Amino acid sequence: MRRLVLGCGYLGLRVARLWQAAGDEVFALTRSEVHGAAFEQEGIRPVRGDVTERGSLDALPEVDSVVWTVGLDRSTGQTQHSVYVEGLKNAFDALRGRARRWLLVSSTSVYGQNDGSWVDESSPCEPKQPNGRVCLEAEQTFWRGIEEQRGVTGHILRFAGIYGPGRLLQRVAALKSGIVLSGRPDAWLNLIHVDDGARIVDLASRTNEPNGTWLVVDDRPLERREYYVRLAQLVGAPNPEFEQLPQLVSASGDRNKRCSNRRIRELLGVKLAYPTFETGLPHAVGQSG
C-alpha cells in the first residue's frame, strides 16, 4: 500500500516505521531538509511542503491512506487554528480524489467534563479551553472533507496524553529540582504510550469498520499525584509537592475526566503492550537515558 504521513514527528514517525516494516511505500510531508534527509535514510520518501501553505502541497502523491499527526511548532508563530483547521483544509484540497482513507489524530481535549466523570465516544463535546475548541473545529472540518468525497472513508482518533521515551525530560528536571507542582494532585490523567498509539493508528488504517471516532487511551486513568510519585521514584527524585488549591478549583482547565478505551478494544481488537502506566512509565524512563 501507499501511505502518507502528514506530521511525521514523535507519533507520526513511529506510524511510518510500522507501515514501512509491513512493506508499504511510505511518504512523509516535512518542512525541513534535515528531517527529509533523515527520512530518506530510513527508506521513507520525503515530500517538502507546509500544510499552512496550500501551494506547497501540489507534490503530495496519490495514496491509499493518509494520517494527520500534525503538531504545532510554536517557533513559527503560527496559531493552532491556522495549523489544525486551515492546514487540514489545505490538505484535503490538495489530496482531493487522491487518498481513499483518512485518519485524523485528534485529542481528548474536545471533552469539557471536569468533574472526574467517565467519558467515551458518545459523551458530549463541550470543551472549555481554546485548545479543545480548535481540536473540535478540526474534527468538524475533517468530517466535511470526508463527506465531500465519494468513496472516501475516515476515522478520528482522540488521543489521551502521549508519553514515552524522550517525553519526560522536563518533568524529570522539575521533580529533581524540587519545584512545587501546580494543579490539583487528585485530578485525573489519561495516558497512552506512544508505541501503543502508533499500533492503534496502524490498526485503524487497516480496519473494515465504517467511519467512526475512537478514544485512544490505556486501560486505567490515574491521579496526577500517583503519576508524579511513581515518576519521582523511578528517577531518584524527592517526593513531589503540590500547590495547596481549594478543592473545587482546578488548575488543569478541563483536564479532569476519565476516558474509556472499550470501543477500540472491541472494534479494533487492541491489545496494549503497556496497558497502564505501571508498565509503560518504567519503559519510558529506561529508554530516555
Image (cartoon, rainbow, N blue to C red):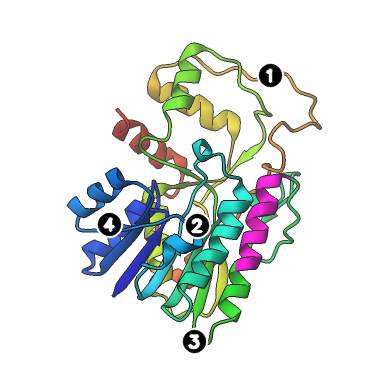
Q: Earlier in the sequence, mark 3 or mark 2?
A: 2
Horizontal relation, residue 272 to residue 262: left or right: left
Q: Amino acid at mark 2?
A: Glu
Q: Secondary structure at mark 4?
A: helix
Q: Position of residue 20 (x, y in %)?
A: 24, 63
Q: Amino acid at mark 3?
A: Gly
Task: Write down the quadrant of residue 50 in the picture.
Answer: bottom left
Q: Which residue is mark 3?
A: 151
Q: Is residue 77 above or below residue 270?
A: above
Q: Which mark is residue 17?
A: 4
Quadrant housing the N terminus:
bottom left
4 or 1: mark nearer the eye: 4
Q: Amino acid at mark 4?
A: Arg
Q: Residue at x 52, y 32 (%)?
A: 227
Q: Is residue 271 above or below residue 115?
A: below
Q: Nearest the camera: 103 or 48?
A: 48
Q: Which residue is mark 1?
A: 243
Horizontal relation, residue 114 to residue 283: left or right: right
4 or 2: mark nearer the eye: 2
Q: Secondary structure at mark 1?
A: loop
Q: CA distance from mark 3 to mark 2?
A: 27 Å
